[in-house]
Image: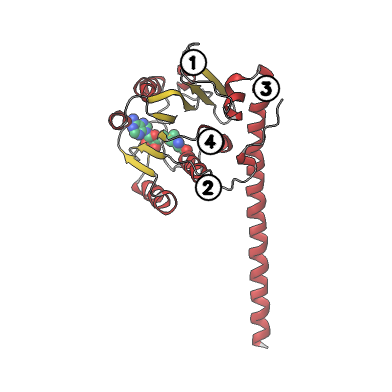
């Protein structure tokens, strides 16, 4: 297998860390933006923006000259439940602080937002809205025509069999007419490339591995991303442990100097 050493394990430190079921795809999310270099990226289903800000950070870190749109009602749905305005406020203020000028939040339903985009205009779409088979099938049918030939769609939760979740069934029924790749970890992430992609010698290494490599190499890629995310998780835990130790040491020093001053 060719050596694959992507940016997520070289120089990625997430700017914002929030709880999300998407956490195990953080490295891949960062790398797929580096690979596709989208002029237009759209996310359907953003909530706390874990996935979305991973994409935005990669756009910025790799000087990708493109626009990003996050679409969500920011009201919740039948699977994650309802949540309050503070979620949108947090996302909005982080977005303004770090990604203003290229990243926009569209607070509306997917069915409405789809009309803002021209056919065959989007390079990368991430679908992570309501996870019933019916909802994800509608999202696919409405947004697929908006994707450029050769563009990429991501689908979260293709491996989740929790009650009411049907993305796995949608994914199984997709048929063989598309180029696809499936990660099984982290509730599953499906990657689909729309036909019509001109094969160029400059194709990114990640896209080649996803869609043009042997079964053995694809399996190695899956294992690689399981480990890449574990590496980040351990580094984060180590970082917070170090921070905890440094914090305690500083507190002790402050105590000691206060004692000395008192003498
Ligand atoms: C699973 S969450 C998204 C998680 C997020 N991608 C992350 O990284 O953690 C799904 C979101 O989709 C939104 N949603 C579901 N269906 C929607 C629709 N038809 N239009 C707009 N938003 C929708 C919900 O409000 C919810 O915030």
**Rounded to the nearest whole Å, what is the CA distance between mark 2 and mark 1?**
34 Å
Mark 4 or mark 2, earlier in chain: 2
Q: Which mark is nearer the camera, 2 or 1?
A: 1
Residue at 43% from the left image edge and 48% from the top image edge: 99
**Which image quadrant is residue 47 in?**
top left
Mark 1, residue position: 178
Residue at 53% from the left image edge and 46% from the top image edge: 61
Mark 3 or mark 4, earlier in chain: 4
Mark 3, residue position: 217
**Rounded to the nearest whole Å, what is the CA distance between mark 4 and mark 2?**
14 Å
Mark 1 or mark 4, earlier in chain: 4
Instruction: Kindly identify which numbered label has been placed on residue 17.
Output: 2
Q: Quadrant of the N terminus?
A: top right
The answer to whether the residue labelled 3 contacts the one labelled 2, judged by CB atoms less than 8 Å apart, is: no
Mark 1 or mark 3, earlier in chain: 1
Q: What is the secondary structure assignment of the residue under circle 1? A: loop
Q: What is the secondary structure assignment of the residue under circle 3? A: helix
Q: Is residue 214 above or below residue 45?
A: above
Q: Which mark is nearer the camera, 3 or 2?
A: 3
Using the rendered image of the protein, determine whether residue 81 is visible from the camera's viewpoint. Answer: no
Q: Is residue 35 left or right of residue 105?
A: right
């Amino acid at each position: 297998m060719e050596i694959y050493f992507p940016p997520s394990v070289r120089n990625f430190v997430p700017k914002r860390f929030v709880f999300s079921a998407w956490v195990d795809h953080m490295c891949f999310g960062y790398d797929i933006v580096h690979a596709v270099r989208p002029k237009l990226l759209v996310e359907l289903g953003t909530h706390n923006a874990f996935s979305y800000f991973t994409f935005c950070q990669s756009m910025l870190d790799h000087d990708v000259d493109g626009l990003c749109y996050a679409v969500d009602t920011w009201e919740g749905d039948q699977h994650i439940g309802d949540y309050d305005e503070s979620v949108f406020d947090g996302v909005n203020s982080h977005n303004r602080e770090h990604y203003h000028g290229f990243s926009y939040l569209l607070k509306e339903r997917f069915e409405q937002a789809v009309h803002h985009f021209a056919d065959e205009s989007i390079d990368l779409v991430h679908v992570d809205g309501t996870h019933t088979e019916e909802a994800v099938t509608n999202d696919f049918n409405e947004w697929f025509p908006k994707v450029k030939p050769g563009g990429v769609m991501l689908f979260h939760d293709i491996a989740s069999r929790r009650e009411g979740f049907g993305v796995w069934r949608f994914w199984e029924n997709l048929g063989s007419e598309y180029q696809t790749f499936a990660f099984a970890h982290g509730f599953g992430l499906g990657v689909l490339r729309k036909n019509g992609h001109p094969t160029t010698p400059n194709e990114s290494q990640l896209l080649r591995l996803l869609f043009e490599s042997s079964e053995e190499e694809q399996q190695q890629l899956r294992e690689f991303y399981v480990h890449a995310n574990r590496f980040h998780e351990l580094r984060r835990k180590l970082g917070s442990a170090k921070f905890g130790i440094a914090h305690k040491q500083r507190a002790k020093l402050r105590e000691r100097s206060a004692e000395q001053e008192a003498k």
